[in-house]
Amino acid sequence: MGFVLIAAALAQVMWPPVALLGRVKPPLLLAAVLYYALCRDTGAALVAAVAGGILHDALSPAPLGYTAFCFCMAAWAAGRARDLVMSDSLVTQVFFGALTAVLVTVLLGILLIRAEVLVSPAERVVWRAGGQLVLGGLVTPAVFLLAGALDRLVGNVARREPIDGFE
Amino acid sequence: MVRGRTYLILAVLVAVVVLLNLPAPVARRVEAGAADNLLPFQNVLTVLGRRARAALRAVSGGAGGREREAALRLEVASLRAALRALDGLEHENAALRRLLDFRKRSELRLAACEVMSRGGTDGWWEVVRLDRGTADGLKEGLAVMTADGLVGRTRAVSRHTADVLLITDPSSQVACRVVRVDAVGILRGGGVSAGGDPRLDMLAGARPLGMDYIRKDVQLAPGDRVVTSGLGGVFPAGLPVGRVERVALDASRLFQRAEITPAADLARLRYVFVVLP
């Protein structure tokens, strides 16, 4: 988990902001948290959310804990739906990736503006939420794929065995 | 099982509440620790990213001339790539020479730094991260500039990294002076918008900087030079900031407000100087 979160945080920091989408960066850390929320138990999801949030805030000017709180909300919301969806499905990953990215952006934006840490008009929060909707939907399946492959490689989860020719 | 989960949720809630209420010095230490520990990995990614971009440029540059024979095309492409690489090196060499020259000429004590990343983890703020920190004499609140002009000021400084809040960020405020008419004002970052100023190039969507609270009785003209006034106590006086682009009365109609185009190329920051005290 630590490796996945650190790799996601570093990749997110190094990624240049996308100007057309409100200067957002792809929510790789959130996607990693979402992976643990949908594919693991509540404990792993919340630990990933807090650790991911601390990493996120430590590498940005946001006060420590704000993103951890938002990630916990996202992980909790996604975890509630864990038993109702197929986490392997691309549709699930795109849907939850996009939805939680918007949720976190709006929640974080409101918290930061209310705390007067961020000077930003409300329309920019909406613009950024739109950007995160697109990027969240795009990057989440990729993060699920990589994190899942890594988990199988190191033996955290059982390898997929074909049954009668089907995986 | 249910009780265990309840305890876990409670523990996480407590952890989040503690995090949100950490005293500022402790929070700063945690942030600085994370920044320093991740620095080596960030360095590797920075270098890899630059090489990948250079390779991409070389490949895209060699895609022309489809009519020619395959072997010839390959040769032309490889020659172009080599030339492009040399051109890039020459450009970098020239930029470094210019910086070195500026450093020699300048009377300020300057620490040269390299920009490692931009925008933090989320891009809410206009910030860049530098590869120098307190170990090199940097601290919070120092002016950061290029040979062309002011870039911003240092914000969070760890042992080996420093975050710089750019003058384009809406929370940035710099006490400035219009040289020709000797009028002072406060320069604020314009933030970003969907339809921005194309002159700000890669900062697509960036609004021009705004200089507020300029006396009504002075006549400003486009092209007037703006420098730091030194009145705020953060930036030394006389650092070039930019030029006046447009002037109008502000909403209160008691002061003038000028739009300023920054002198430094904020879109392509690679090497900067931190003005040491």
Image (cartoon, rainbow, N blue to C red):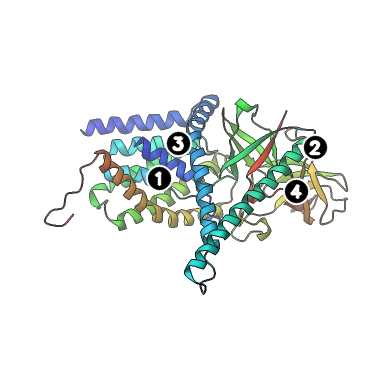
**Label 4 sits on residue:** B211
Q: Tell me where residue B214 appears, x and y as whole percent.
A: 81, 47
Can you see residue B191? Answer: no
Task: Indicate which label's residue lies in the foreground, 2 or 3.
Answer: 2
Q: Tell me where residue A107 appears, x and y as whole percent.
A: 46, 46
Foreground of the two, B213 or B201: B201
**Earlier along the polypeptide chain: callout 1 or callout 3?**
1
Q: Are marks 4 and 3 on the same chain?
A: no
Say which amino acid is labelled 3: Leu
Disc 1: host chain: A
**Earlier along the polypeptide chain: callout 2 or callout 4?**
2
Disc 3: host chain: A
**Label 3 sits on residue:** A55
Tell me: B115 left or right of B217: left
**Label 2 sits on residue:** B105
Picture residue at 54% right of the left edge, 48% below the top: B50
**Label 1 sits on residue:** A30
